[in-house]
């Protein structure tokens, strides 16, 4: 198959690129803004048609959650409008689409692991535009698979893990929110799952994916420092009210992964095992 990957320079896109040699039966078109402006509908349709694209893995998104509150138009373009263009273009070829979404489509007040059929209720601009993006891709492409994920990190790009390592080496004390809980997702694990799904065939619908286990941001930061060998920085627990942000975060962001595990026979690693793997990779760079 000819497969288009958008957002190829982001965390997930970069991990997918590393796995492509293992899927040599497919031809991948890795694009970011320089290669394809997905907010340009004509450019999207031309690219999909001229390259005979069979499937799209959409990793592109506006993910700066706080900035989204003041950049609503740009956020809407990238998270809602552009995915619909991709879905419309691939539907014309009878192809499929994997669209990456987020736990932020929920408000975080459920306090039981969210299943795919739970009613979304986003708190802010980011979550609202991602939810609208889900509805758009489902409307325009029949063979659409939506994967919601959470707390994504990788050895690529900017993320919580790399920030905690940097701050841990620069500062003697930092404060991290302790009353927001969820599950981290190592982007490489999600990339492996996506490649498995491509190999086994797209089953349309909404799915959830994160690593296994549940922790707070504070616990996550403590684990990062322990695994990175950082001992000179004290991590202090904070209440959300002590760390105000423009966007409201979901206090409970745990996703139920039963559906994706049963449908594709995927075994998902425990969060600490994957964190250790990522930190070891970072230490070798």
Image: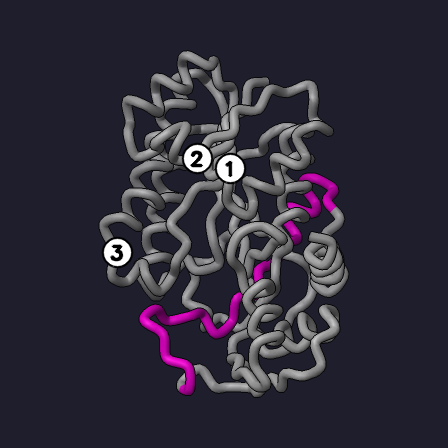
Name the residue that disc number 3 marks: 71
Name the residue that disc number 2 marks: 32
Q: Image quarter for residue 42?
A: top left
Q: Residue at x 74, y 73 (%)?
A: 229
Q: Position of residue 121 (x, y in %)?
A: 37, 62
10 Å crowding of disc 3: few (<14), some (14-19), many (20+)? some
Helix, strand, or loop for circle 2? loop
**How many angstroms separate mark 2 from mark 3 (CA)?**
20 Å
Q: Nearer the viewer, residue 155 or 191?
A: 155
Contact (CB < 8 A) between labels 1 and 2?
yes
Looking at the image, tell me whether mark 2 or mark 3 is earlier in sequence order.
Answer: 2
10 Å crowding of disc 1: few (<14), some (14-19), many (20+)? many
Which numbered dot is residue 256?
A: none
Q: Position of residue 238 (x, y in %)?
A: 50, 86
Does the magenta portion include 265? yes
- The secondary structure that dominates the magenta segment is loop
What span is in magenta? Answer: 242-266
Height in image: 182 above or below 63?
below
Helix, strand, or loop for circle 3? loop
Which numbered dot is residue 8?
A: 1
Q: Nearer the viewer, residue 32 or 63?
A: 32
């Amino acid at each position: 198959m000819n497969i288009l990957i958008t957002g190829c320079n982001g965390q997930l896109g970069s991990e997918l690129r590393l796995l492509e040699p293992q899927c040599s039966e497919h031809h991948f078109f890795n694009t970011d803004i320089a290669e394809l402006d997905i907010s340009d509908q004509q450019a999207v349709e031309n690219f999909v048609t001229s390259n005979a694209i069979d499937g799209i893995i959409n990793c592109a998104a506006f993910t700066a959650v706080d900035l989204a509150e003041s950049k609503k138009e740009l956020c809407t373009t990238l998270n809602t409008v552009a995915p619909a263009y991709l879905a419309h273009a691939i539907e014309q070829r009878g192809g499929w689409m994997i669209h990456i979404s987020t736990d932020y489509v929920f408000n975080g007040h459920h306090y039981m692991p969210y299943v795919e059929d739970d009613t979304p209720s986003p708190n802010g601009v980011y979550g609202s535009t991602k939810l609208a993006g889900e509805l758009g891709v489902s409307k325009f492409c029949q063979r659409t698979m939506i994967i919601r994920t959470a707390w994504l990190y990788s050895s690529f790009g900017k993320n919580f893990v790399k920030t905690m390592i940097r701050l841990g080496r620069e500062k003697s004390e930092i404060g991290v929110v302790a009353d927001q809980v969820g599950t981290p997702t190592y982007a490489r694990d999600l990339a492996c799952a996506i490649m498995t799904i491509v190999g086994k065939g797209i089953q349309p619908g909404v799915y959830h994916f994160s690593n296994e286990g549940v922790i707070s941001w504070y616990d996550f930061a403590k684990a990062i420092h322990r695994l990175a060998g950082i001992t000179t920085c004290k991590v202090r627990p904070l209440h959300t009210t002590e760390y105000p942000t423009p966007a409201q975060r979901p206090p409970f962001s745990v996703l139920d992964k039963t559906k994706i595990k049963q449908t594709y026979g995927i075994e998902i690693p425990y969060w600490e095992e994957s964190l250790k793997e990522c930190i070891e990779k970072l230490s070798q760079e």
